[in-house]
Amino acid sequence: MAGRKNRNAELRIPEILEAYYRVLIDEGLEGTSISKIAKSIDIHPSLILHYFQNKDNLRAALIELIVSKFKSRHLINFDHIEDDQERFDALMDMIFSYEWSRTVDPGVHFGFYYQSFRDEHVHKLFTDMFVWFRDFLHDQFVDFNRKGVIQVSDEVKAADFVLTMMEGLEFHAHFLAGDNPFEDFAQSCKKTAYTILKNRGV
Amino acid sequence: MAGRKNRNAELRIPEILEAYYRVLIDEGLEGTSISKIAKSIDIHPSLILHYFQNKDNLRAALIELIVSKFKSRHLINFDHIEDDQERFDALMDMIFSYEWSRTVDPGVHFGFYYQSFRDEHVHKLFTDMFVWFRDFLHDQFVDFNRKGVIQVSDEVKAADFVLTMMEGLEFHAHFLAGDNPFEDFAQSCKKTAYTILKNRGV
DNA sequence: CAATATTTATTGAACGGACAGTTAATAATT
DNA sequence: AATTATTAACTGTCCGTTCAATAAATATTG
């Protein structure tokens, strides 16, 4: 192929990962192959292996990218809100929002959860991510507790509880929501969380 | 192969499904093939296709078996307990027990959840199962509510809430429990559920 | 600046293996 | 004799991976 234009690793690697993500959404875990990813961005399959050596590395790289986006806090940083109650409300609104639940495509999300049962490295990446998020919530809850916005006796358990509801809501949306909009049961979950957090439920 | 002993469909089909389930646990979704299943019980791969025609049917059959075991209620039937409070306690103890969480191998469990994103038929099977379970809980909660064991204003939401906690707990056990025994956080979840159900939290 | 060497990006060809599925033959059972 | 269970042989496809070849970009040097 003469007269072609090359890109460097800095551009190509993210391009491959984005293509991988898109193919995953369309084709699923089992339907996604290196050659399909390559075809979707008109490159040769070998180029993907040139950058990632093998499929395991490729998968790990995508998960690391997803985790790093999660940790960037771009959706859950409300430091600019001065009023304590408002800041708490904003955080809870986000955690139980549709937008938040769709940060990652739910199919891909569940697919990687599943992978974490088969691959210790994947499991560790996600565990680290969730531990990071629990720690984040814990810090927030310690602060909100001190300021009287919430009333809990165990801030770690409070964070665990909210995370558990958050993931349970994901399950509910997929299997039990039926035709009801996501927000309906999300609202119920949030109200329940308020009840628990405000009245020493944990 | 001369002098062999044949079995009929009634025996062979469950044998194949059990073998399939075991291979799934060992090898995962992607690692499980018809020939591996066949090898594990010393039969020819074609015999599996003889009974199930193709892989999709095989998968559907296993899921249907799992669902039917779930619906058999063998673990959640406490009709023999006469005292209302005790019967309620027994039900809640079971739902938040380790035994209950391991009714199906969690890897297989998550794997099929994932499949339900890719396959409408699988999604329907699980949706039906969870709707069935919500209806079951709903009936129980209506009864317990009438008898004053719990105090809720919306029994459907109460059932949704308990199911959400139940599945969230599954998630928590896999990613956030660390070295703590399953029962620790399960106990917390159950306590939270009691708080909500006993005090009109829903 | 131009010629050349080196590095990097990319393609190409080929592999061995596994996979789901088909069709036909054979053995056991009824 | 008919039906059912089981094996056998085979097919075409796709997969991840390897290794070598080539083209483009970059660095080096005269």
Image (tube, coloured by chain):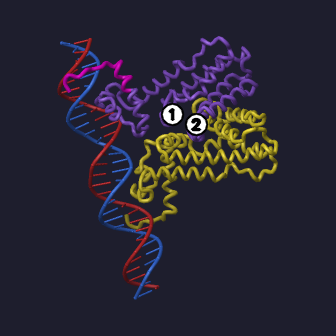
Chain colours: A yellow, B purple, C red, D blue
Label 1 sits on residue: B106
Q: Residue at x 72, y 32 (%)?
A: A192
Q: Chain of mark 2?
A: B
Q: Is there any visible trace of residue B116 in the rendered image?
A: no
Q: x, y (%) of residue B102?
A: 52, 29
Q: Is there any visible trace of residue B178 in the rendered image?
A: yes
- Up/down of C1 relative to B81, above or below: below
**Along the line of sight, the residue nearer the viewer: D25 or A13:** A13
Q: Chain of mark 1?
A: B
- Up/down of C30 relative to A32, above or below: above
- Up/down of A69 relative to B65, above or below: below
Residue D11: which quarter of the image? top left
**Along the line of sight, the residue nearer the viewer: B64 or C11:** B64
Give the class, few, some or many, for how many residues have Cα within 10 Å of label 1's Cα (few <14, many ≥20).
some
Q: Are marks 2 and 1 in contact (CB under 8 Å)?
A: yes
Q: CA distance from mark 2 to mark 1?
A: 10 Å
Q: Which residues are magenta?
A: B1-16
Q: Earlier in the sequence, mark 2 or mark 1?
A: 1
Q: Which three-letter amino acid code belongs to the residue tagged 2?
A: Ala
The reply to whether label 2 and label 1 mark residues of one chain is yes
Q: Secondary structure at mark 1?
A: helix
> Does residue A112 show up magenta in the picture?
no
Label 2 sits on residue: B173
Q: Which three-letter amino acid code belongs to the residue tagged 1?
A: Pro
